[in-house]
């Protein structure tokens, strides 16, 4: 009779699902999972905070399409991971969090780190359950992963009590369901696709807004085909950044506000009408709207639409690209928008080339853009400095832009970098932090150093929570506007240097590029602390609906 423990069953089930790496922080409740992972040759990346583990698991899913898995201990281990799970939930990212629990014999007795994790996780997961039977562990892992990828993707949570993990059962009594993710992609209703194509064909001033689901569904090629065939100006947000390159003449960045206010037909793909689109109000009241989304409940949410198509974004884009006709309209609309792009670029040029001290954030963004390798993964972790840089830094390849997403979670930078280097060790990874954001999970540079993951980090240090500060100053004036949002101009580079990484301080614009080059050549996890002007705010921050 062959005996196997619950932790070993966890590892076997994950291995069958294609999982090669877990992110974790150790705890007595979960150590048998490590035992199983060592048996199955699953890499264990141990971090310094459970929030880091959860964020890293999400980034792994986004980068690879393979389920990201975080394993945390009971009680505060699970509660520390909540922010990462909630971020993945809002980002529609499939991942799995496994949490420990006190032994079943101690439930409701006040066992160490005992907590009702399942109820805590239910509002922010696709599935949240407790496994009470060791023999059923593979079944529940399969179910959790299937739920994570079904419909609108999102995280799943499994709680496993310590005695369930430690218990040994007869291997012959364990059923391993075949892990299966359907290769099929739900297509859009053909009649609705034809209606949408006809509406786009008749449009004089059409525009496309393409969001995160374009990348999640790996529909970047289909989006390019549609944009080029229909000659429609296309704007990207969220994880879709990078899905069109600068070689596409219909990819625009800076004229979005004008385009949406003037467009007669807008195609919204895989992105909700949330605060980023002012809940739909950024689009002209007179515009006809076509919306494509994986989630039926998002169709027409916050803004009335004319045609709503539920389906896999890659599949629907392919249908739509086949259905549209080359347009008969003139090029005056795209030329109008290109002129606005040129005008706005010229307006920013003095700041992009500014030699001011403190350093202008746009100068820093331009230096990073010019420095980055073509295949670099760019991670944005911050508030106003990231809003500003998003109009300057454009990834050259799909899937190479990672940001917090609509939950606005700060602290994703170091965890995302850990996942990126673990998943793509040969790729250059560049992280732009706000100084507030770095303070949240920056100590996990220790993880980068221990695992010899050379990333290039840059802190845009304005010694303030500046995105919040702007709104406070606007509402209450300068004196009260600085309440509770001013930080010290800390030498974050020295913190990383003390851990064993490479660190530098930069106070002059001409020193940025040499510092970046030294960081690259150091071969170590590096951090450049760049002092930027605290009294410069991005136009995006000034225009955000939360400040209106």
Image (cartoon, rainbow, N blue to C red):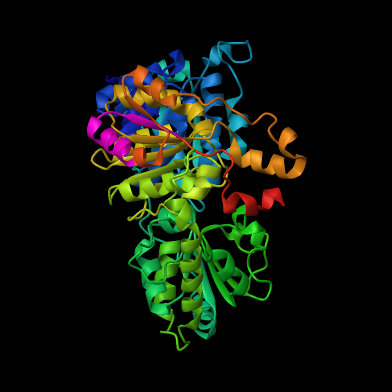
Horizontally, residue 410 falls left or right of residue 216, namely right
Q: Residue at x 55, y 31 (%)?
A: 463
- Is residue 518 depicted above or below 360 in this figure? above
Q: Residue at x 61, y 58 (%)?
A: 277
The spot of residue 441 in percent (x, y) is 47, 27
- Is residue 9 depicted above or below 249 in this figure? above
Q: Residue at x 57, y 42 (%)?
A: 408
Q: Residue at x 43, y 69 (%)?
A: 317
The spot of residue 499 in percent (x, y) is 35, 18
The residue positioned farthest toward the right in the image shown: 476
Is 371 magenta? The answer is no
Horizontally, residue 61 falls left or right of residue 161, namely left
Give the magenta part as a residue range.
513-530
The residue positioned farthest toward the bottom in the image shown: 328
The spot of residue 255 in percent (x, y) is 52, 66
User: Can residue 147 be seen?
Assistant: no
- Is residue 537 depicted above or below 169 in this figure? below
The residue nearer to you, when weighing 95 against 541, is 541
**Quadrant hosting residue 9:** top left
Is 515 magenta? The answer is yes
The spot of residue 263 in percent (x, y) is 58, 75
The residue nearer to you, when weighing 85 against 172, is 85
């Amino acid at each position: 009779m062959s005996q196997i423990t619950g932790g070993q069953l966890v590892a076997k089930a994950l291995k069958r699902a294609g999982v090669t790496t877990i992110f974790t922080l150790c705890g007595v409740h979960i150590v048998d999972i490590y035992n199983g992972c060592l048996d199955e040759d699953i890499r264990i990346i141990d971090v310094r905070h459970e929030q880091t583990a959860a964020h890293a698991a999400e980034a792994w899913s986004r980068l690879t399409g393979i389920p990201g898995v975080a394993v945390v201990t009971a009680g505060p281990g699970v509660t520390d991971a909540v922010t990462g799970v909630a971020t993945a939930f809002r980002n529609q990212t499939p991942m799995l969090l496994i949490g420990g629990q006190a032994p079943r014999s101690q439930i409701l007795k006040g066992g160490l780190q005992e907590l009702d994790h399942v109820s805590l996780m239910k509002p922010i997961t696709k599935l949240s359950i407790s496994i009470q039977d060791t023999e059923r562990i593979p079944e529940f892992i399969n179910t959790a992963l299937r739920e994570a990828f079904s419909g609108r993707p999102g995280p799943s949570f499994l709680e496993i009590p310590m005695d369930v993990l430690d218990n040994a059962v007869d291997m012959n009594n364990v059923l391993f369901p075949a892990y299966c993710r359907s290769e099929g992609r739900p297509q859009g209703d053909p009649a609705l696709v034809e209606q949408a194509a006809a509406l786009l064909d008749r449009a004089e001033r059409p525009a496309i807004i393409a969001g995160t689901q374009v990348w999640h569904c790996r529909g970047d090629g289909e989006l390019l085909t549609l944009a080029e065939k229909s000659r429609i100006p296309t704007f990207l947000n969220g994880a879709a950044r990078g899905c069109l390159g600068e070689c596409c003449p219909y990819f625009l960045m800076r004229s979005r506000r004008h385009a949406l206010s003037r467009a007669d037909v807008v195609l919204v793909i895989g992105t909700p009408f949330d605060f980023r689109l002012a809940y739909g109000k950024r689009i002209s009241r007179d515009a006809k709207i076509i919306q494509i989304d994986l989630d039926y409940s998002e169709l027409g949410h916050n803004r009335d639409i004319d045609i709503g198509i539920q389906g896999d974004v890659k599949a629907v884009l392919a249908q739509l690209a086949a259905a549209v006709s080359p347009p008969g309209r003139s090029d005056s609309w795209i030329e109008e928008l290109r002129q606005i792009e040129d005008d706005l670029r010229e307006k920013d040029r003095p700041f992009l080339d500014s030699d001011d001290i403190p350093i202008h954030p746009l100068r820093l963004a331009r230096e990073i853009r010019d420095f980055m390798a073509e295949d670099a993964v760019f991670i944005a972790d911050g508030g106003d400095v990231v809003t500003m840089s998003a109009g300057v830094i454009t990834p050259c390849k799909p899937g190479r832009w990672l940001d917090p997403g609509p939950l606005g979670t700060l602290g994703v930078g170091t965890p995302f970098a850990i996942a990126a280097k673990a998943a793509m060790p040969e790729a250059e990874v560049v992280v732009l932090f706000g100084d507030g954001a770095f303070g949240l999970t920056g100590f996990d540079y220790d993880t980068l150093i221990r695992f010899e993951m050379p990333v290039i980090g840059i802190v845009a240090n304005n010694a303030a929570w500046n995105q919040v500060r702007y709104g406070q100053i606007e509402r209450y004036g300068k004196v009260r506007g600085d309440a509770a949002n001013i930080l010290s101009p800390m030498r974050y580079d020295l913190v990383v240097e003390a851990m064993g990484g490479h660190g530098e301080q930069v106070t002059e614009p001409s020193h940025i590029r040499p510092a970046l080059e030294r960081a690259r050549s150091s071969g170590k996890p590096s951090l450049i602390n760049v002092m930027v002007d605290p009294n410069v705010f991005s136009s995006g921050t000034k225009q955000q609906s939360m400040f209106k």
